[in-house]
Amino acid sequence: MPVVDSHCHVSPTWYEPVEVLLFQMDRNRVDNAVLIQMKGQANNEYQTECVRRYPGRFASVVVVDEKREDASRILERLAEQGASGLRLGPTDRSSGSDPLAIWRTAERLGLAVSCGGRASDFAAPEFTALVQALPGLTIVIEHLGNLNHPTNANDEQLRARVFGLSRFPNVYMKIHGLGEFCERAMPVTEPFPFRQPIPTLLEQAYQAFGPRRLMWGSDYPPVSGREGYRNALHLTMEQFAGKSTADRDEIFGGTALRVFPIRH
């Protein structure tokens, strides 16, 4: 099964161009990556170009200004150009008579939504109502539902509500590197640079969602300011060493390929 990075950012203006990501992917034997448009950027031309220039390597998850009257038409055009998904926040709503219009358009087009936001917003009744209203839409919660922040991870009720979204079969979750929720050891230790014991968030996510609704993503390039790309992959893989080969194949490739298809 290919190794797929489900959460990368590239840009010639902010972060790094795609060639730097490709260097990290090739160096660490990552076959494919899902390019996630950064928040605040609704110009998706660069990601579209990356998919075109490197066929078979990337999927593109785009951002559309959901408040625009023509937001659905813009998303339709982006899907025609090869987009595999749409990025929204849990509280994002369309203007006009139907606040879920852009969400419904993604559902109609067969595009998954990569969803990033605050844990409290994922845990809110309004987000549960949205999920229930769109049973045909695959929604992928980024960054462990923002439980990767220590204050959130230690809030048992909040954690239970976020992981409890796994009861909806159309809700998936992204896991990332340990550096998002583990404390760095000082002085730095080798080969494992985090203080022990580490929080059990990855196992909790596995128990809640199962391997077919979990996907690993590096969060490149912000991960470079934490443990780095290689450790984000391999140290996370080590946390699942006790799982079956089939389960690991899903978490580190299969799930992402189904949800965000690679356009050839």
Image (tube, rainbow, N blue to C red):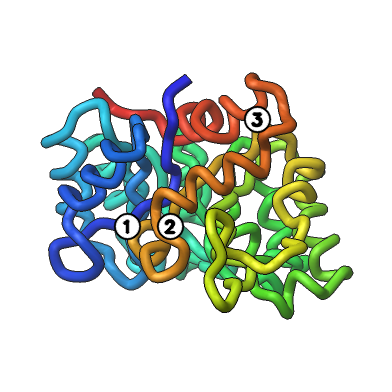
Task: Quote the CA–CA distance across marks 1 and 3.
Answer: 24 Å
Residue located at (28% from left, 67% from top)? 41
Q: Is residue 99 visible?
A: no
Kind of residue indicated by mark 1:
His
Q: Position of residue 109 (x, y in %)?
A: 42, 36
In the rendered image, is residue 251 in sight?
Answer: yes
Q: In 3D space, how far apart are the residues under numbered discs 2 and 3 (Cα atoms)? A: 20 Å
Mark pair 2, 1: CA separation: 7 Å
Mark 1 Cα-neighbour bin, 10 Å: few <14, some 14–19, many ≥20: many
Categorize mark 2 by other alpha carbons within 10 Å: few (<14), some (14-19), many (20+): many
Are the residues flagged by discs 2 and 1 in contact, CB closer than 8 Å?
yes
79 with respect to 104 (left or right): left
Q: Earlier in the sequence, mark 2 or mark 1?
A: 1
Determine whether the residue tagged by mark 1 lies in a helix, strand or loop. loop
Q: Is residue 92 left or right of residue 212?
A: left
Mark 1 and mark 3 lie on one chain; the one further toward the N terminus is 1
Residue where numbered disc 1 is placed: 9
Check the picture and name the quadrant holding the C terminus.
top left
Q: Residues within 10 Å of mark 3 (few under 14, many from 20)?
A: many
Query: Residue 85: image x %, image y %?
Result: 41, 43
Q: Is residue 64 above or below residue 91?
A: above
Element marked by disc 2: loop
For the point 15% across and 69% down, which residue is it? 13
**Which mark, residue 219?**
2
* Residue positioned most to the right: 157
Which residue is tagged 3? 212
